Image (cartoon, rainbow, N blue to C red):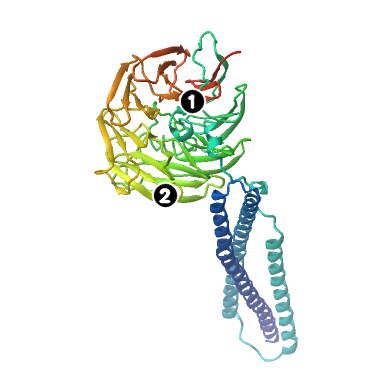
Amino acid sequence: MSFHINTIKQNAKAMNQWYASAVSTAIVGSVFSFIILALLVSNFIRTTVIQARREQELINQKIEIQSRPGDEQLLSQIRQLDLQFRQSLIRNLNFTRKGAYLLLGSVVITLIGLKSAAYLKKKMPAPTPGGDRLKEQMQEAKYSRLAVTAGMVVLGLGSFLLAVSPEVVFYEAKPVDISYPSVEQISKNWPRFRGPGGLGISTYTDIPVSWNGKTGKGILWKTEVPLPGMNSPVVWGDRIFLTGGDPNEFHVFCFDVNTGELIWTGKVRNLFSEGEEKPFDVWDDTGYAAPTVVTDGRRVYAIFITGIVACFDFDGNKIWEKDLGIPDNMYGYASSLAMYQNLLLIQYDQGDTEDDKSRLIALEGFSGRTVWQAKRPVASSWTSLIVAEIGSRYQLITCSNPWIISYDPADGEELWRVDCLGADVAPSPIYANGLIFAVEPHMKTVAIRPDGRGDVTETHVAWKIDGGPDICSPVSNGQFLYLLSSDGYLGCYKTEDGAMLWEQNLKDYFQASPSLVGDKLYLLSEEGVMFIVEAGREYKELARNELGEKCYASPAFLDGRIYLRSEKNLFCIGNQD
């Protein structure tokens, strides 16, 4: 009997000790949870309030620099503020992530302590007389102190880890160049599809008029492009940019303008190679890399068939990558990119007119952050947008079934629209002689006065003519408008009223858009034949040069040179002194 009583006493003593430890653990865990929660709330408030002030200050300074582009002191302040903003943001996100893990751990410890205490309380033996109660209480207090001490050690260790853990490095913490090129800098380069403004007009006139790809006459160099693509060369300074893609790889290529050497290759995410089901069948006429890149002279931006857009610096370092979502159309994304100041502009048209899926997107060039978006009541399109200086402001012009729509490129505000297009629209618009010219393939060509507001369908259509090219975009010298169809018909029209002056059958096939160099038209056929025609009231062929390779992309024109992409190679054509 006495042995049984002693056993009960020992069990009760042990149970009391474990019970006290469980309660203490639960208390410490709950206190730790509340402390971490308070720190997370404080961090959230600091992020939303202080960071919001910094971001607004940064935005205000960016707006101010637009009116003071030469202010190096203000530009330096913007760079430093941007760097501080990004570093602080990463610190706060890092703290939130680690704090969330600690909060989860402390809550788990609290729950374990509470559960254990409840279980031990149920199992605790009924108290029996006898025994040294004071000694038992002292023993319980000892275990409680040990539990509290252990909890404090966990709390201190967690706080120490939060305080001293390494920060995430953001682009190696280098200051970001947030400036953008001047109009003069843009005009000296070929920064996008069809050159400055997307108009297909060279600012240089000393362009070669004679070469031969088979004999090598006039060919300064020739370089194989590693992957196929329908996109056109973009040139800035001593760099040429192209993209290429196949079912396994999407790449951005950078070549040297003087030697043709491949300087670097930038890899972009390819959904087709990740084991996912193909979202659409790739059409041979577009391929995997149809859109032409754009550059601001600091970075180069590329987009591919699946809606993945990426930014690289001129040394080939990937700055950011963004997934815009699989486009809802039968051929994938195909429109080329454009820039306005520091904004990357993307015409992301998809689906049908009633699907409400199309949108216009403006991303901050150096960060990839979405600055604004505008929904578009249009269907899928092939066209590329242009940004034109019209009067005292810039307008962003887009074409897709059924609307031609103008926006303010700074904020996406719609300025005017005209209901006049149908079916799949491929040729891009141009601006010349105070008019916007747009084409509905095979059906019509339209001239619009761009000074209206709202729906100006009934008031601002200057003229319409039947027919229009199906693929090639128009070009104009202001006096005349030139339209080239894929089956080789070249027509000349007066810009003031659309009256036809002449039409010529070149008896060849074309996908590259016509270009204007001084008083000459350069027309590149699919067979690699460049027709050089006088840009005048009458048709006059000046030269015909054979490259000897198939060509689908529009050429780039720089000082004394033509950069031309064939089906497999990149060519530099120039005068050989």
**Image: 55 above or below 430:** below
Confirm whether residue 174 shows in the render: yes
Quadrant the N terminus occupies: bottom right
Q: SS for tag 2?
A: loop
Amino acid type shown at disc 2: Gly
Direction from residue 183 to residue 128 in the image, left or right: right
**Image: 545 above or below 468:** above
Percent x, y of residue 489? 32, 19
Pointer 1 and pointer 2: residues touching (CB < 8 Å)? no
* Mark 1 surroundings within 10 Å by alpha-carbon count, few (fewer than 14), some (14 through 19), many (20 or more): many
Percent x, y of residue 273? 49, 35
* Residue projecting furthest to the bottom: 129
The residue labelled by disc 2 is 412
Percent x, y of residue 110? 60, 71
* Mark 2 surroundings within 10 Å by alpha-carbon count, few (fewer than 14), some (14 through 19), many (20 or more): some
Q: Which mark is residue 6?
A: none
Percent x, y of residue 187? 52, 33
The residue labelled by disc 1 is 228
Q: Nearer the viewer, residue 420 or 6?
A: 420
Dot 1 or dot 2, earlier in sequence: 1
The label nearer to you, 1 versus 2, is 2
Amino acid type shown at disc 1: Pro
Residue ID at (48%, 29%): 246
Q: CA distance from mark 1 to mark 2?
A: 34 Å
Direction from residue 573 to residue 519 in the image, left or right: left
Quadrant the C terminus occupies: top right
